[in-house]
Image (cartoon, helix red, strand yellow):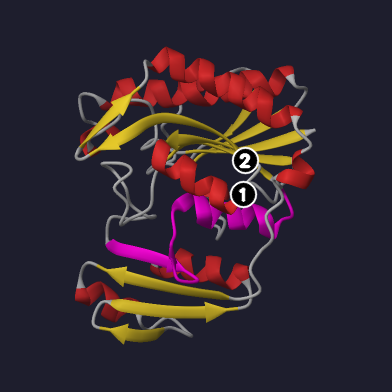
Amino acid sequence: MKLFLSADIEGTAGITNWDETEYGHSRYGYFAEQMTKEVSAACAAADRCGYEILVKDAHDSARNILPDKLHPSATLIRGWARDINCMMSGIDTDKFDAVAFTGYHSAAMSEGNSLAHTMTTDVHSVKINGKYASEFVINAYTAAMYGIPVVFLSGDAALCESAKELVPGITTVASKRGFGAACISEHPDRVCSMITRGMEEALSKDYKKTCALKLPEHFSVEISYRDVNTATGNSCYPGVVRLDAKTLLFESDSYKEVLRMIHFIL
């Protein structure tokens, strides 16, 4: 049995400021280590459940997880392969039984996380079929494209709540709650313990029935940029329709084409 795990940082316990997510800032090292601990907590549970684990470091440089402190059961993908699967890069390298996410965060236009965004801070909002889309939604649909159930998520409480609307059977662990520009978080060690228990629970379920996500038959993706010049440049992408000065629309029946569009203009 094989598990694919995509790891981000803005949903890590206690993180609340952009400086804490960026290499070179004084507090980044602490949160890179906490990100590693949370990933390791998930891997420890998956290992006990008999799973081989492939972890994709999916934040910024994709070189945040500390390899020597990662659970030894995991294989790690560092850096960006530049393929259209992006934060899910590597999911097509093997036949995986389940997909999990750690350290994920709420979408742009959400109050659930002081660091809420979708893929980039250059966009005001991203909607898929009329609903604000988080990176979790984008990547859960990628898992569905490959026919793999989405079984586990850790991150901010608002994202966990919205994830259950998309995948009712998913097991979630809330690492923190948004509180304006601040956050309220459990002790980081407690969050790691919760992640371990949550992953064990997720993998003990009949998740092929309860966590299988069906792709929509059609995708309407609306991207609203913060800067008009960015929208102008990206409006040149084939198939894009410009709705107003800062808003673009892309429609397709193929999610692979949606990912291709995201790769180039989001």
Instruction: Locate residue 45 relative to residue 184 in the image: left or right.
Output: right
Q: Which residues are magenta?
A: 123-148
The residue tagged 2 is: 170
* Residue position for label 1: 167
Is 84 in front, or is 256?
Answer: 256
Secondary structure category for the residue under label 2: loop
Q: Tag 1: residue type?
A: Val
Residue 229 falls in image quadrant:
bottom left
Query: Can residue 95 be seen?
Result: no
Q: Nearer the viewer, residue 23 or 137?
A: 137
How busy is the neighbourhood of tag 1: few (under 14 within 10 Å), some, or many (20 plus)?
many
* Quadrant in the picture for residue 141: bottom right
Say whether residue 118 is left or right of residue 138: left
Report whether residue 221 is seen. Answer: yes
Q: Among all residues in the image, which is located at the extreme top?
A: 189
From what the image shows, is residue 213 above or below residue 24? below
What is the quadrant of the N terminus in the image?
top right
Q: Badge 2: how crowded within 10 Å, few (<14), some, or many (20+)?
A: many
User: Would you place residue 152 above or below residue 190 in this image?
Assistant: below
- Position of residue 89 relative to residue 47, above or below, is below
- Amino acid type of the residue that numbered disc 2 sits on in the rendered structure: Ile
Q: Which mark is residue 23?
A: none
Q: Nearer the viewer, residue 259 or 132?
A: 132
Q: Percent position (x, y) of residue 243?
A: 33, 85
Seen from the viewer's position, the closer of residues 140 and 25 is 140
The question of residue 230 being in magenta is answered with no
Residues marked 1 and 2 touching at CB (< 8 Å): yes
